[in-house]
Image: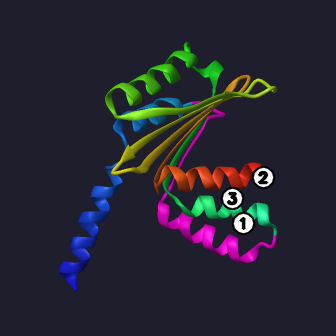
Amino acid sequence: MLRLLLLCFCCWSAALGAQEAVIKDFIKVHRKGAENAAVKVPGWLIGLASDVATVSTDDPGEKVVFRLLGEVGTVRLVSYLDDDFPEPEYSVVNLLYVLERYKRFERWAEVRTPEGQRVTLSVRYQNEKIRDLVAVVREDERTTLVSARTDLTAQELGRLVGDLQRL
């Protein structure tokens, strides 16, 4: 039994280091500030919350959102005010450049809404599955970065996004 626990602990600790160091460093730098926040939510907690929420709701829109959340693993999020940093636009562009140039991420979408929000989505494929998602949302004076581990195919993600658009 002790050997099994040690094996599980070793596998679990290896999974913790699986997120990119460049993303961790970006979050570490940008979480500083009075109104800035950084959160890390483990995948098992997201899966548990998704299962409970899916069962407890009757709204089909909420069920789709909770089903999408159930497909996401560990999530790291940082939200910060752009005024707290000298060149906030440069740091985001640099992060995306490093991810796409050196870490095998691909830019999947870049959208500008009529309200002025800019959303950038980059993904990393491995064995025909999307393993990592990075989304950056830039509003007037606030930037939010979300990094998540996934195990979805492009078709599954497209189907879930299509379900969301139909709502």
Give the side of residue 43 with respect to residue 16, left or right: right
151 in relation to 119, above or below: below
> Which of disc 2 and disc 3 is earlier in sequence?
3
The 10 Å Cα crowd at callout 1, few under 14, some 14 to 19, many 20 or more, is some
The numbered disc on residue 63 is 1
User: Quick one: SS at disc 3?
Assistant: helix
Give the side of residue 51 with respect to residue 114, left or right: left
Q: What residue sits 35% from the left and 34% below the top? A: 104
Residue at the spot of label 3 = 65
Magenta span of residues: 33-58
Q: Position of residue 85 (x, y in %)?
A: 56, 19
Along the viewing direction, whichever of 7 and 107 lies nearer the viewer:
107
Q: CA distance from mark 3 to mark 2?
A: 12 Å
The 10 Å Cα crowd at callout 3, few under 14, some 14 to 19, many 20 or more, is some
Q: CA distance from mark 1 to mark 2?
A: 13 Å
Q: Residue furthest front?
A: 155
For the residue marked with disc 2, what is the amino acid?
Arg
